[in-house]
Image (cartoon, rainbow, N blue to C red):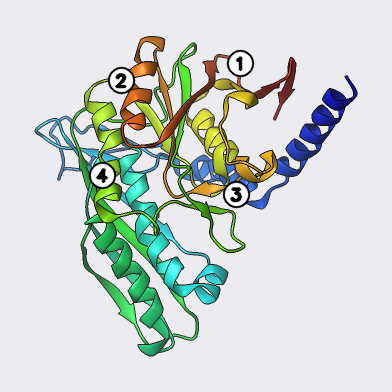
Amino acid sequence: MKNMSIEISDLLASIENLRNNESILDKKDIEKTYATIGNRVQSSVYFPKDRAIILLGDDAAAIPQNDGNHLLFAAEGIVINFLNNDPWFAGYSAIMVNISDICAMGGLPVAVTDTLYAHNAEDSHLIWEGMLAASKAYGVPIVGGHTCYHSTNKALSVAILGKATQYLLNSYKAKSGEALLLAIDQNGAYYKEYPFWNASTTTDADVLQKRVHLPHIIANNKWSSVAKDISMGGIIGTLLMLLNTAKKGAEIDLESIKKPTGIAWEKWLSSFPSYGYVFTCSLKNIENIQSLFLTHDIHCDHIGHIISEKGLFINFKNHKIKF
């Protein structure tokens, strides 16, 4: 009984720390953007004649096409400290995270462009090497962009184009009662001092490229219509973003989440995995999704379910804690 009390006390302290985690707070604050710009726009005259609605606030913009399919468009910027302190990996990550945004929509990446500011060409060498390494590993070409070699400060952003069929994954369609699934490639290790679980740079290119297709397969088999990739802010931050757009809540069972041996809950729940997604699905499709990931050596946990009451609730040893 004493040990259980210690565990609960430790968990409560960890949750309080997570509530104040800068990356998680950043994810929660994203909703403030949409208070200004709204959460949807109507397509212009260049797109379908029915002027379809494009929802904002997901991993990528899904632009409907006349044939019923979708053009996907996303972009990511790299924080300056990361770019200065680890330029090769910052370049690699800029490509990798954009690919995840396309995959999270049930799409496939087509090509990327970059915007790079550096002091000079030599100053950008490692950034370029990282971007090219990721481009080759994932089979997604860099097809252009903008480069400035006479800038006072360094800066990097990458945009990506993707495609999807009519069967999209997004975070608007989550329904009460649906299962929550968590798929993470745990065949990796933490990268230096960063809260980043790296299962990418150590994995063969053919394996990476096959795994890119898995959310696309899930979408087109209609096993799920909801997904988000786990990014900065980790599992907790990503779930909060999903629930915000879905206007729903969720209960998760902490003990159902598999994590690497020796890693504290606080660290794992806020970590950014190189390959990680949250899905919702009907109960009948849990096994289909789990089996697909298992054939690609990726663990997929059934961690909870969507509820109508707004908020994220964490269950642990018969205790229910609201995040």
Q: Earlier in the sequence, mark 4 or mark 2?
A: 4
Residue 170, quarter of the rendered image: top left
Q: Residue at x 44, y 16 (%)?
A: 175
**Distance between the Cα atoms at labels 2 and 3?**
31 Å
**Distance between the Cα atoms at labels 1 and 2?**
24 Å
In contact (CB < 8 Å): disc 1 and disc 2: no
Q: Which mark is residue 223?
A: 2
**Distance between the Cα atoms at labels 4 and 2?**
20 Å
Q: Earlier in the sequence, mark 3 or mark 4?
A: 3
Q: Residue at x 43, y 72 (%)?
A: 88
Q: Which mark is residue 72?
A: 4
Q: Decide: few, some or many residues near mark 1? Use Cα within 10 Å; few <14, some 14-19, many ≥20.
A: few
Residue 224 seen in render? no
Looking at the image, which is closer to me, 42 or 150? 150
Which kind of residue does numbered mark 3 sit on? Asp
Q: Note whether 154 is above or below 8 in the view shown.
A: below
Looking at the image, which is closer to me, 127 or 133? 133
Q: Nearer the viewer, mark 1 or mark 2?
A: 2
Q: Nearer the viewer, mark 4 or mark 2?
A: 2
Q: Note whether 127 is above or below 286 in the view shown.
A: below
Q: Residue furthest right?
A: 2
In contact (CB < 8 Å): disc 4 and disc 1: no
**Distance between the Cα atoms at labels 3 and 1?**
23 Å
Q: Earlier in the sequence, mark 4 or mark 1?
A: 4
Q: Earlier in the sequence, mark 3 or mark 1?
A: 3
Which image quarter is the C terminus in? top right
In contact (CB < 8 Å): disc 3 and disc 4: no
Q: Which residue is mark 1?
A: 309
